[in-house]
Image: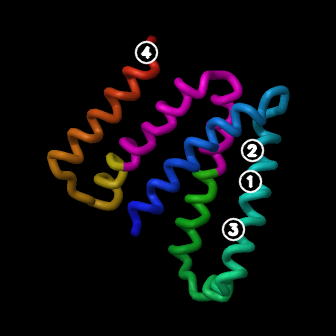
Amino acid sequence: MWIVYALLSALFAALVAIFAKMGIKGVDSDLATAIRTTLILVITWGIALAKGVVGQAATLTRTNWLFLILSGCATGLSWLFYFRALQLGQVSRVAPIDKLSVAIAIVLSIIFLHEKLTWQECCGVALIIGGTLLLILK
């Protein structure tokens, strides 16, 4: 089932680029990000409330809180930079560079999470990087 969620994530991430590019014309990218983030906040809290999982927040450890906060900060910065890049550049060039996050995440997972890579995964990372370069170098 995880693959369905991953594919849906990819689909909606692609739509983010298209909708954002259309929505930020003549709008400050930071304001656009703030508006988008507010909507995300309302939707995600609504889902958590509807599922009845908000009470689980009391069971989170300090480590959970620390890394969730750091993840939130990284997400916010990623979105701010992404919207600014979309405002200044073409989606066809910004989106591939943004997707380098896949290769970067894999490298960081080796360093910080001590995950092991197979040769297929190493080839995949190389192809992602090569594909990105192919798309952005005109």
**What's the mark number on residue 44?**
3
**What's the mark number on residue 37?**
1
Q: CA distance from mark 4 to mark 1?
A: 32 Å
Q: Position of residue 15 (x, y in %)?
A: 61, 43
* Badge nearest the viewer, 2 or 3: 3
Name the magenta segment's main secondary structure: helix
**What's the mark number on residue 33?**
2
**What's the mark number on residue 7?**
none
Specify which label sits upstream in the sequence, 4 or 1. Answer: 1
Instruction: Compare residues 93 and 68 and report the one nearer the observer.
Output: 93
Q: Amino acid at mark 2?
A: Thr
Say what secondary structure mark 1 lies in: helix
Q: CA distance from mark 4 to mark 3?
A: 37 Å
Q: CA distance from mark 3 to mark 1?
A: 10 Å
Specify which label sits upstream in the sequence, 4 or 3. Answer: 3
**What's the mark number on residue 137?**
4
Q: CA distance from mark 4 to mark 2?
A: 28 Å
| Label 3 CA crowd tier, 10 Å (few <14, some 14–19, many 20+) | few
Magenta residue check for 90: yes
Residue 122 vs 41, above or below: the answer is above
| Label 4 CA crowd tier, 10 Å (few <14, some 14–19, many 20+) | few
Instruction: In the displayed orientation, state which residue is furthest to the top.
Output: 138
Query: What colour scheme was applied to this rendering of the protein?
Result: rainbow
Q: CA distance from mark 2 to mark 3?
A: 16 Å
Instruction: Compare residues 105 and 9 and report the one nearer the observer.
Output: 9
Disc 2 to disc 1: CB gap under 8 Å? yes
- Please give the range of residues in magenta: 76-105
Q: Position of residue 13 (x, y in %)?
A: 56, 46
